[in-house]
Image: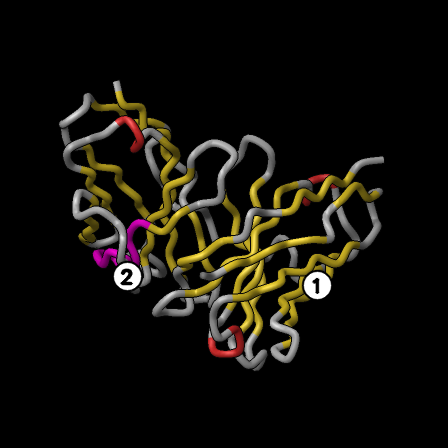
Amino acid sequence: QSALTQPASVSGSPGQSITISCTGTSTDVGYYDYVSWYRQHPGKAPKLMIFDVNKRPSGVSNRFSGSKSGNTASLTISGLQADDEADYYCSSYTSIDTLVFGGGTKLTVL
Amino acid sequence: QVHLVESGGGVVQPGGSLRLSCAASGFSFSTYAMHWVRQAPGKGLEWVAFIRYDGSKKYYAESVKGRFTISRDNSENTLYLQMNSLRAEDTAVYYCAKTYTSEWGFDYWGQGTLVTVSS
């Protein structure tokens, strides 16, 4: 199972919105609604930001939203803040009972 | 408060074995599926293995199938990863992760334990 495809990097200024894409196939992202997004600051463990495509865990800001269209899922962060600067990973359940992650996207807040 | 604490990492020679443990507290361990995820130095996340809440189902990444075994002791609230025939490419920080509402999303991660495979 190949890794999901994410852009290597994205950037935005404070207050702006950015979107990170996550492209898979019809046997993972395109078929199942088990897409999650994680934020990872350097040297720290990942943190769940979005699960089941578009649901936010309690405690996660409503500035974070998720969506999916076809084989591509997206994470949108609105009102960018300095603390949003981190690596972001998507993941998806697959048809062969495995989990696949994206390669990760480095978000820079300018 | 949920806590996941991994242990058992270290330096091992190629072909060697290690057993990782993940001590869980602060939640009903026996009712949640658990996973191991790893991250090679400077690289992205890679899923390793899954075990259902009661141990009835186990799934593995192709890269570790036949070499790694995931298990759990619900009476001790502990998750394990037995790693055999280790290779240089297994060098990574290994995280245990607790599932959330589905079996395939993680709401809590441990701090990780570093495994280095080197001669």
Magenta stretch contains residue A93: no
Q: Position of residue A53 (x, y in %)?
A: 25, 57
**Closer to the camera, A103 or A108?**
A108
Q: Is residue B64 above or below residue B51?
A: above
**Closer to the camera, A5 or A55?**
A55
Protein chain holding label 1: B
Residue at the disc numbered 2: A52
Residue B45 shown left or right of residue A28 in the figure: right
- Residue at point 15%, 36% (across, down): A78
Q: Quadrant of residue A51?
A: bottom left
Question: Which numbered marker is on residue A108?
Answer: none
Magenta stretch contains residue A53: yes
> The disc labelled 1 sits on which kind of residue?
Gly
Task: Please identify, in this view, whether the residue under mark 1 or under mark 2 is nearer the observer.
Answer: 2
Colour mapping: secondary structure
- Residue at point 17%, 42% (across, down): A63
